[in-house]
Amino acid sequence: MITISVGFPSAAFLLVLQVTVFVASAFDPSPLQDFCVAADEPNSAVFVNGKFCKNPKLVRAEDFLFRGLNIAGNTMNKQGSNVTLVNVDRLPGLNTLGISLARIDYAPYGLNPPHTHPRATEILVVVEGTLLVGFVTSNPNKLFTKVLNKGDVFVFPIGLIHFQFNVGHSPALAFAGLSSQNPGVITIANAVFGSDPPISIDVLTKAFQVDNNVIHALMKQFKA
């Protein structure tokens, strides 16, 4: 609150008001990568929170176009799923627009394993097949889950662990919109058991309350 005394100079009042409005409207921009370490020497710094903008005079319609989401992804892998992400790296026109898109293909009983998007909410629509989907809240962990059929839509809130599992006998297909040009993805099992360098065995055995041999076996599964 600003208290104005009689005779307060109008110029000073306007300056105070301008600064107040500026401070009230200031905010930290949302990060578009995992981290951005401050650099004391500008000559050694790079700008990574977003991308540099193209000269508007050089922009073409092709900068806003991506072709290929009609092509099914290869699901011949351990999980039986494939994610084709269209983010700012593949569609430059997305820069600063805060949105991206993904095609997700599932083999019969294929799984898009538990993962998070640290910078995006996801909205999923099923185009073909039947999917068991769900997400888990922050502590205390509550599971919200549903079986989705063709035409159903489900939302995964930003940063929460979620998954999709094809419970049908035939392939399934879904499309997902994400609220970031670079949503990021952390696949939980890969991050915990396949990090480089690996997390300490002592940490994992205590965290999961299992024998060392169990942790070693899991690490072998997810070693890059």
Image (spheres, rainbow, N blue to C red):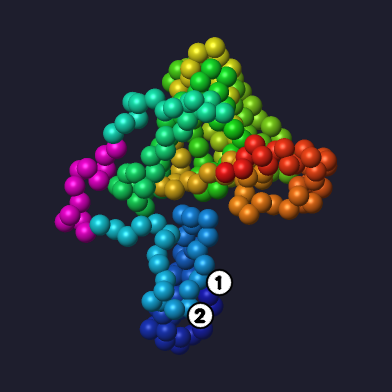
The answer to which quarter of the image holds residue 164 is top right
Decide which of 220, 166 is in the foreground and name it: 220
Decide which of 115, 138 is in the foreground and name it: 115
In this rendering, position of residue 212 left or right of residue 165: right
148 over 160 or under it: above or below: above
Closer mark to the observer between disc 1 and disc 2: 1
Q: What is the number of the mark on residue 1? A: 1
Decide which of 178, 67 is in the foreground and name it: 67
208 over 46 or under it: above or below: above
Residue drawn at 71 percent across, 35 percent down: 142
In this rendering, position of residue 33 left or right of residue 145: left
Q: Can you see residue 67?
A: yes
Disc 2 residue crowd, few under 14, some 14–19, many 20+, Cα 10 Å: few
Helix, strand or loop at label 2? It is loop
Magenta residues (range): 55-66
The answer to which quarter of the image holds residue 74 is top left
Q: Is residue 60 magenta?
A: yes
The residue tagged 2 is 4
